[in-house]
């Protein structure tokens, strides 16, 4: 399997690369590569796919991923209407896993670092005080030079390695079965679904994107993503519902139809199956925080 390398232009084991993003919307396709990647979203929101994880991201999102973990961040539709004035501001750090392992022979440090990279093979989303501390460092790192940049980076890794404020994104059982040809196909499918999940989508319509028959597409999608198209679409819709439920101006019926469901019975059934709570219970929990 040859990883698809996206906008990462080095292969050394003693280098980190920092990319500062300030643009109207995110453009990177669904991809994976041979480097670790730390993503801090200073300002933006939308949908995020990491391995077999489907969810939302918003201001402050902080995710660490190990090599060869497929991922894509896709902005919500509002970002594609430039007159709305939304912008994406983010910092991305690429680094080889060997960069950290080559710094020292101290076994405690090596064990801690290896443990962090192993956990990040599923993708780690950090929160709480950890995210706050890292955000403060990353807000300065892109302007740093020389040793100061390396010192900032090592501070970040030290905080992440010692933190318990994280959640795994992809499931432990997820395996990257994509090749370069697959990523192109799935990128088109994922982008289409993230832009159109709020309406009815026929199997014929989505399979045409890959120039496949419906049966061939279903086999292809389930083999590569390790879940059915129906399950993926429901996770996308329910993830969006969780976001809308934070806004009390939306009634339960509003949320149901905004997410692409035609009736509240189906909405309630899939919401509870995915979140283990009813929409009402989920909203009450948010209010009581």
Image (tube, rainbow, N blue to C red):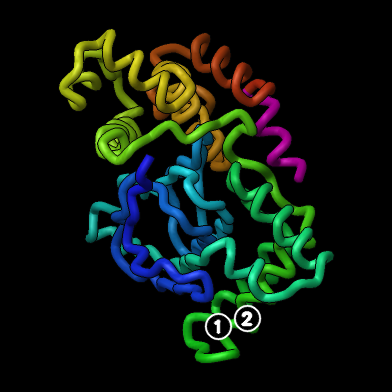
x and y percent of residue 13 in the render? 51, 70
Quarter location, residue 110: bottom right
Q: Secondary structure at mark 2?
A: helix
Residue 140's disc number: 1
Using a 10 Å C-alpha cutoff, classify the residue at mark 2 as few (fewer than 14 neighbours), some (14 to 19) or many (20 or more): some
Please give the range of residues in magenta: 279-289
Regarding residue 249, the answer to whether it shows in the image is: no
Labels 1, 2: front one: 2
Residue 155 among magenta residues: no
Quarter location, residue 129: bottom right
Q: Nearer the viewer, residue 178 or 233?
A: 178
Image quadrant containing the N terminus: top left
Q: Nearer the viewer, residue 123 or 271?
A: 123
As drawn, which residue projects farthest toward the front? 105
Q: Main secondary structure of the magenta part?
A: helix
Residue at the location (30% across, 33% down)?
A: 182
Q: Nearer the viewer, residue 116 or 54?
A: 116
Placement of 243 over or under 107, stated as above or below? above
Question: How many numbered badges does the structure rendering display?
Answer: 2
Placement of 199 over or under 241, stated as above or below? above
Q: Secondary structure at mark 1?
A: helix
Residue that carries the numbered disc 2 in the rendered image: 152
Q: Are marks 1 and 2 in contact (CB under 8 Å)?
A: yes
Residue at the location (51% across, 28% down)?
A: 238
Residue at the location (73% across, 36% down)?
A: 285
Image quadrant containing the C terminus: top right
Residue at the location (45% across, 71% down)?
A: 12
x and y percent of residue 221 in the render? 36, 22
Residue 284 among magenta residues: yes
- Whole-number angstrom distance, CA of label 1 to CA of label 2: 8 Å
Regarding residue 98, the answer to whether it shows in the image is: yes
x and y percent of residue 119 in the render? 68, 47
């Amino acid at each position: 399997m040859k990883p698809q390398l996206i906008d990462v232009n080095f292969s050394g084991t003693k280098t980190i690369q920092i990319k500062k993003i300030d643009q109207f919307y995110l453009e990177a396709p669904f991809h994976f590569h041979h480097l670790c990647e730390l993503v801090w979203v200073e300002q933006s929101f939308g949908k995020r796919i990491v391995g077999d994880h489907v969810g939302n991201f918003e201001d402050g999102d902080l995710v660490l991923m190990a090599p060869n973990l497929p991922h894509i961040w896709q902005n919500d539709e509002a970002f594609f209407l430039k007159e709305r004035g939304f912008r994406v501001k983010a910092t991305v750090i690429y680094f080889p896993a060997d960069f950290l392992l080559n710094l020292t022979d101290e076994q405690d440090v090596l064990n801690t670092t290896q443990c962090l990279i192993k956990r990040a093979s599923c993708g780690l989303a950090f929160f709480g005080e950890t995210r706050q501390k890292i955000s403060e460092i990353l807000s300065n790192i892109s302007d740093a030079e020389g040793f100061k940049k390396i010192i900032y980076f090592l501070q970040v890794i030290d905080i992440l390695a010692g933190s318990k404020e994280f959640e795994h994104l992809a499931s432990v059982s997820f395996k990257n079965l994509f090749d370069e040809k697959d990523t192109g196909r799935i990128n088109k499918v994922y982008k289409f679904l993230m832009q159109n999940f709020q309406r009815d989508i026929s199997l014929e319509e989505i399979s045409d994107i890959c120039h496949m028959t419906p049966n061939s597409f279903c086999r292809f999608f389930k083999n590569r993503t390790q879940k059915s198209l129906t399950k993926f679409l429901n996770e996308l819709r329910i993830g969006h519902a969780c976001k809308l439920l934070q806004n009390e101006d939306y009634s339960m019926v509003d949320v149901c139809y905004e997410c692409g469901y035609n009736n509240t019975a189906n909405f309630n059934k899939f919401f509870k199956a995915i979140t283990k709570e009813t929409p009402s219970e989920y909203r009450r929990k948010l209010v009581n925080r």
